[in-house]
Image: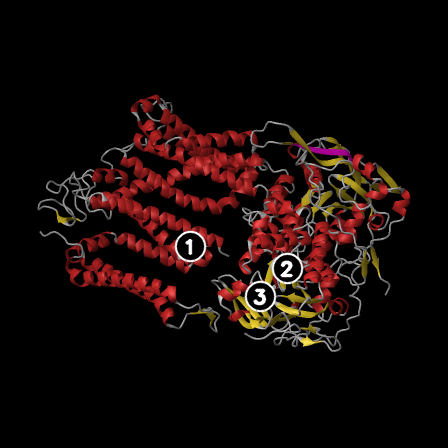
Amino acid sequence: MTTWDHDQPILEIDRLSISFFTRLREIPAVMDFSAKVMPGEALGLVGESGCGKSTVALGVMQDLGTNGRIVSGSIKFKGRDLGGMTPDDLRAIRGREIAMIYQEPMASLNPALRIGRQLMEVPMIHEGVSKSEARARALEVVADVKLPDPERILRAYPHQLSGGQQQRIVIAMALMSKPSLLILDEPTTALDVTVEAAVVDLVKDLGKKYGTSMLFISHNLGLVLETCDRICVMYSGEAVERGSIADVFDKMRHPYTQALFRSIPLPGADKNAHPLVAIPGNFPLPHERPPGCNFGPRCDYFEAGRCDSGPVFMTPVPGDERHESRCLRFAEIDWDAPPAAAQRTARVEPGEVILKMNNLKKYYEVAANALFGGGEKRVVKANETLTFDAREGETLAIVGESGCGKSTLAKLLLGLETATEGEIRLGDTSIGATPIQERATQTVADVQMVFQNPFDTLNPSMTVGRQITRTLEVFKIGKDDSERRERMRALLDLVKLPREFAERMPRQLSGGQKQRVGIARAFAGGARIVVADEPVSALDVSVQAAVTDLLMEIQRKEKTTLLFISHDLSIVRYLSDRVMVMYLGHVVELGTTEQVFSPPYHPYTEALLSAVPIADTKVEKQHIVLEGDIPSAMNPPSGCPFQTRCHWKDRAGRSLCESEVPPVRVLADGHQVKCHLSDADLAAMEPVIKIAAE
Amino acid sequence: MDSLTWMGALAPFFGPAFGGVAATLGLALVVQFVAGLFAPHVRPQTGGDGMLRPRSDIFGRLDRLPGLIFTGLVLLGLAFAAISLVVGPETAGILGGMIQRFLPVWIALIATFGLSIRFKRQLGLYGKLFDSTIGMIGFGLVMFWVYTALFVGLFDLIGTHDPLDQVSGLKNAPPGVPVPEGETGFAHYLLGGDNLARDIFSRMVEGSVMVMMIAPLATLFAFMVGITLGLPAGYYGGKLDTVLSFLANLILAFPVILLFYLLVTPEIIATGLPSYMAMVLFIFPLVFLGVLIHARFRNQAGQSRAILALVLGPLVLLYLAVINQAGTPVDFWPLDFFDIPGGILVVFVAVVFVNSPTVFRIVRGLTLDIKTRDYVAAAQTRGERPWYIMLWEILPNARGPLIVDFCLRIGYTTILLGTLGFFGLGLPPESPDWGSTINEGRKLLLIYAHPALPPALALLSLVLGLNLLADGLREESLRD
């Protein structure tokens, strides 16, 4: 065995290429990929979906499945080549020296075993320790991942824990054997923002405490900034730039990295004055990669005859330590030049009030005993006394985490549910008590929705064109089929899709293209209000900007009111005129974007702002980590809904917060907050996000 | 004239050849298995073209050996078949004779496979089937019986004698026996005679017609019933779901055989119960099609009515003609231009009745899953009616599992038909269907095994083929 000492890299990947073999062809997933992780170092692997970042992780675990194979290159762990190991050797390393944490916590835990059994198994298998010792260690690790009451947790089954707690258990399991390398594959994507912030915090602390090296895979640049020392940006199977966080974030030397940063909404971006710059074109499919530079066809600095002539290799950036870029022209490009002046647009002044919600309530009755239907009935208060209005041409963002009641609000508005109490007025008509079957066709066409998941939003067995013409048929637009087909083509033009797409099946479209079809469908009947439920959160960063801009452009043209549901405050700040923050069915804060994003805040808004990772090294954030999980709407806390997690509670008077729901207070014109805090406390709040002076 | 032997004049060469190669294959498999226990682990290597390079050591060679021997066996079989086609039963014996009789089926099968493989990339899921060996074997077995049924039923090919003809002296005669002088037609009873001196081979191929007529159609009807009830149960949930699911469970819990006995009892038939059940069950395809068309064209009232009239008009006439039976309580329709034999109707009704609850449960489960998708929500937000959502948004996306289940269910139905025939339920006693023939052969099984075996093997191969086909379809629909 090769000797290995502690100043050599833990993990050294050298010119790795991995391919998958299908019936038709070989699909290269990773090409010429090199990386080094030193002891105690955290390397972030960033890229869009399909760029091969997860394949690298699976390659390190030597778990590529039946049709994936390492074609060339080597992966050395502590100086030993993983590719040359027998299954027995690998088994000894996996889980003991290299541990992996996956995206979906519930899929990583065995639902039939108690948490304790699963945790104790790790050292018992790998180190052969006794049962009692393993149990002691499990208790210690569970306490380390900051779970309350470790004894109870060890006796619990996975389904008895919340998503955040499950992910903590997965992390605990990975740490049970004190691995030298931890691979985290999008560990927080399935979690809510505030829970994500707490988990990320935990991972960072534990990395320091145990001295574990980390390979952190994510599509979120902000998260990588918060957790890692070094970063490697991947594009279409290749590493395009790698270096320290500071180098890559502030002195990027690859056009793709630059384009990526320009397409995410950082503080300061604004839909009118500083719009996002989307990356043109689409991500190339693995078997359709261009010759030469993979990013060439979408690059602003592309030079024909040079960038597309031959393979491009990683070249060190002079002056920086371990900073490399896969670009032929990085020395010639003026990296400080501002982006080509994007089109500025005038701010659209909101028109008259078009939608008015007054004291809206939605309660669900849930039978406590589902099997026999009898017994007491519980009431789930999904929406509590919502009062707000929206104007023509305005973007109202609704922000909140899962279970806050935003989807119920959308259902009420669309007529899929009817309100328990209160009123919804669309123009002059009251629609709160009218289910969708009884609404007039025009009312239905007026309120439409764009859905979150692009892979779910289109019927997979109907052509794209047919889905749009069907909508037109239902809305009674056009006299006959040919007229409707013409209108359908016009709608495809509107969302900037080629007209040939009408004949395609949804599976032939990329996520961004499907989302565009979804938008076309929503605007088919000339909608006056469009509810967009996280329309871009499932899309890749480079596509997000394009779809967002498209949505804004159509809104401007059609003067539509957009209700933008999201948990991503960066994008909310970028595109909304007013923001409504919801928590457990209550509107806790409502105001214009400037009012909500600057103090005084509602304590929940403050925590949300702090939790959102921002991919900018110049931003300083106040560090607020919320304890615990979001309470269940079945069993909400007494008094203020946020009191169980609020860290201002002592200031406002504990008993007051625990006993009474706070009143709505108007702080400034159009800015309202539901909180018991005194005016003085509110006034004393400091901004969460500060941009350091340059 | 002499009796035929199994391989006739070819036996001196092919007999030992088949035996020898088969024995070697068995031996090679045993050796490969034993050697596999001792083989050291080797990492798979890829070659320059990216394909997996085979192991080059002795163990690699051992791995490939059984495949080679099997190929040899197949080639030997093909050679035998080719010779038989030319020389016929006089030289190639019973096996050769049967191969020759099936000639139209072989031609049809080769044409089907050739065309399908040639165009498999343009044929969607059906084309993908030809990437899976299992699926191809299954499809081959199924199509063998489908073509047999077609040629027997439509052109009266393949069979050597009339399935009901008795030839004196051939009672329980062994396979290959010559037909006595003076009788017309084929010179031998290829698979011998049964205890009423009828040709077993002809009865076996004739039996396939029965199965092919009833099994797919009954399964289709069961699917119509299951889908029409399962979709609303899953989509609406609540009380409707509870009631329908309870009924389905009730039917599933009822002993099937007892149910059949009840349905075919003359007293019960006299009350008209089977006819009433037929009335109810056969209305479902009409309801299904009617709702399907209406939901699609709801917004173009004129077009909707035209298409509905065009499709439903003939179907309603057909429906009335089918359910209307002279001599039963359901006898009111003057235009009854054909009658289905009472026995077959009862079998049909019984099979549909016991199969539909299972289909109902599958459809209900799939609906529960698919109705949570965003495209269903999108349809709801544009104000689509529930039946449109069920039939045009949910049903097409549930087709994968349903197609697989359809194949499997034809297999179950085939077995069910066999069981019914075996108990002599419904069908007339002289009917050549496989279940009845097995039952007749069973009586003298210890003395004469040959009458019962051919129909049993035929039943086995068809159901096996359907199961393999379903496996292949499922596997291929899951792959990329």
Q: Label 2 marks which chain's residue?
A: A
On the image, numbered disc 2 is attached to which residue? A184
B453 vs A659, nearest the viewer:
A659
> Which type of secondary structure does the marked residue at label 1 adopt?
helix
Q: How many residues crowd around disc 2 within 10 Å: few (fewer than 14), some, or many (20 or more)?
A: many
Evaluate whether label 2 is on the same chain as label 1: no
> Which color mode does the image show?
secondary structure
A527 part of magenta stretch: no
In the rendering, which numbered label is found on residue B129?
Answer: 1
Q: CA distance from mark 1 to mark 3?
A: 35 Å
Q: Main secondary structure of the magenta part?
A: strand
Q: In the picture provided, is A267 more to the left or to the right than A379?
A: right
In the rendering, which numbered label is found on residue A23?
Answer: none
Q: Is residue A496 above or below residue A578?
A: below
Would you identify the image quadrant in which residue A560 lies? top right
Q: Residue at x 78, y 63 (%)?
A: A617
A115 vs A69, nearest the viewer:
A115
Q: CA distance from mark 2 to mark 3?
A: 12 Å
User: Mark 1 touching mark 3, by CB under 8 A?
Assistant: no
Q: Is residue A675 above or below residue A614?
A: above
Q: Amino acid at mark 3?
A: Val
Closer to the eye: label 2 or 1: 2
Q: Is residue B197 above or below residue A516?
A: above
B347 vs A211, nearest the viewer:
A211
- Residue A88 visible to the viewer: yes
Give the quarter of the figure containing the N terminus of chain A. bottom right
Q: Residue at x 37, y 35 (%)?
A: B351
Give the residues drawn in magenta, as a range: A357-365
Q: How many residues crowd around disc 1 within 10 Å: few (fewer than 14), some, or many (20 or more)?
A: many
Q: Amino acid at mark 2?
A: Leu
Q: Amino acid at mark 1?
A: Leu
